[in-house]
Amino acid sequence: MDHRQQIKDLYSIIHKLINEVESLKKLNAELGQELEKYRTPKNSSNSSKPPSTDFPKIQKTQSLRTPSGKKPGGQPGHEGTTLRMAVPDTIQKHSPNCCTCCGEDLGGYPVHFIGRRQVIDIPPIEPIVTEHRLFGVHCQCGHNNRASYPDGIVAPVSYGPGVQSLVSYLSVRQYLPVERITELLSSLFGLSLSTGGVCYLLEKVKQKATPVYESIRQFVLKGRVVGADETGVNINGKNHWAWTFQNPEATYIAINKSRGTKAIDQIMPEGFGNNTLVTDCWPSYFKENAAGHQLCTAHLLRELKFLAQKYPENSWAPRFSKLITDALQMRNDDKLTPQKSKEIIQTFQQLTKKPVNQKIKELVSFQKRMVKYSGYVFAFLDDHQIPPDNNASERAIRNFKVKLKVSNFFRSSAGSDCYAVIRSIIDTAIKNHQNPYEATRLIAILHSTE
C-alpha cells in the first residue's frame, strides 16, 4: 500500500477521534451540570420549594432557626393547662352505711365532709327533631288565614344550622374527608347523611357565607399592607391555583385557573394602589400597580443558604445572608435608627455591585434579581407595619396542602370554592381570637342567599 494513502487514512481516523473526544467532553460537561443538582439538591429547608416536592428520604435537617439556648419544654412564666374543679352539674354523695370495725348501722349518725373529686364527661348526644305544623284560622269576616313556615324551612325534612356548622367545621377546619364525616355523624349522633348530603350542606353554608366572604375581601384591600401567596390545587386531576391575600386581621382565599396577573386582576380588580404587597419573587405580583413591595426575607435567606452550601468557596452569599439577619435582629430588638437603616442600604448596594463568579450561573441570576428588586428588599426597615417576611401568607395557604394530603384532591370546582370561602371565614375568626366553630355556627343560622 502507498505510504501516502496510509498517512491520509491515519489523518482521517485522527480527525474522527478528535470529533468523538470533543463530543464526549461536551456530554461529560452536561452530565456534570446535571449531577450538581443532586450533590446539593434544593428542598424546602434551603429554598422556596414546598415540602411536597422534596425527594423521598431526604432529611429535613436544615432550617433557618438557630439554637435559642433554652431548655426543652415549658419556659418560666408559661401558663400551663390542667384540669381544674368546676361548678358541678350533678352531685353524688357517698357515706359509709355501716362501721367497718364492729358492723354498727351508721344510718342515724351525723356525717362530716372529708373530700371531693370530679369527673368530666360527655353525655350521649342525640339529635333534636323540631316539627313545624301549620294551622289556619277562619275569620268571622270570611277570610281564611294560613300560617307560614319560618324562613329557611323549605323542604319536608332538612338539617338545621347545628348540623350545617358541624359539617363545615369538620371538613374545613379539621380536614376530614367527606366519607369520614358521614361515619362520624352516624357513629356519634345517629345521623345518616350521604356523601352527597355532606357536599350539599357545605354548599349551603358557602351560599350563606358569601356576603361575609366579600366583606373580608374588602377589609383586606383597606389594609395598608397585604400579604399574598399562591399554591397549586388539584381539582379532579387538573391543576388550579389557590390564592391568598391577607393581613393581621383577615384572610381571603380564592381559587383560579391561572397563576398569572389575570388571576390577580380577577380576584382583586380594584388593584393595590393603596397597599404594600409582601410576597415572594413571583413576577406576577410586580406587574401590579401597588403602592410598594416587600420581598420575603425568609425566602431570600433560604436561597442564600443553598448557594452558600453549594459554593462554599464564594463569600458573597454568606455576607448577604448576614446583612439580612443582622437587619432583622436589630428590628426585633428595636435598635433600628435612621443611621443604621442607611448603613444597611449602603452595604446592600455595595453587595449588588460587587462582581461575583460569572461561572456560577445561579449566583449571577440571584444577584441580578436583587438588583432588579433592590427597592423591595429592605422596605421593612423604616416602617414597622411592613412585615419582613411572608410567613403569614404561607400559613394561610398551607391549609390547602393539608386538606389535599388528607383527601388527595377536590372532586369539583364547587368543592374547592366551598373550602376557600369557609376557610377564609374560619382563619379570619382565629386571627380575631374567636372560636372557629362558633364562626361557622353564626354563618349557618343566616338565611340562605339562594
Image: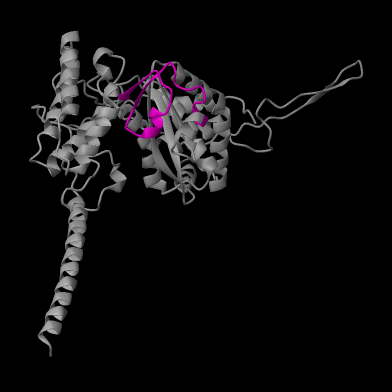
Instruction: Pick whichever, 88 or 271, lies toward us.
Output: 271
Residue 366 coordinates in the image, percent (x, y): 23, 36
Q: Which residues are magenta?
A: 266-294
Q: Residue at x 40, y 42 (%)?
A: 232
Task: Name the one closer to the observer, 91 or 307.
Answer: 307
Residue at the extreme top: 338
Q: Is residue 142 left or right of residue 337?
A: right
State which quarter of the image contains the C terminus: top right
Residue 445 showing in the rendered view: no
Asked whether 35 or 59 is in front, the reply is: 35
Where 307 sits versus 69, above or below? Answer: below
The residue drawn where x is 8% and y is 27% is 69
- Residue 185 versus residue 144 in the image, above or below: below
Q: Position of residue 102 (x, y in %)?
A: 18, 32
Relative height, residue 408 to residue 277 (above, below): below
Residue 272 visible from this viewpoint: yes
Is 225 in the magenta? no
x and y, in percent, of residue 414 in the image: 54, 41
The N terminus, quarter of image: bottom left
Farthest-out residue, bottom: 1
Direction right: furthest residue? 142
| Residue 284, magenta (yes or no) | yes
Q: Is residue 173 left or right of residue 375?
A: right
Residue 63 or 119: which is nearer the viewer?
63
Name the side, left or right, on which 270 lies relative to 245.
Answer: right
Labels in figure, total: 0
x and y percent of residue 365 in the render?
24, 38
Q: Which of the 4 quarters of the picture holds residue 206?
A: top right
Q: How is the image coloured?
A: one colour
At a point 10% along the width and 38% down the height, the residue shown is 314
Residue 84 picture quarter: top left
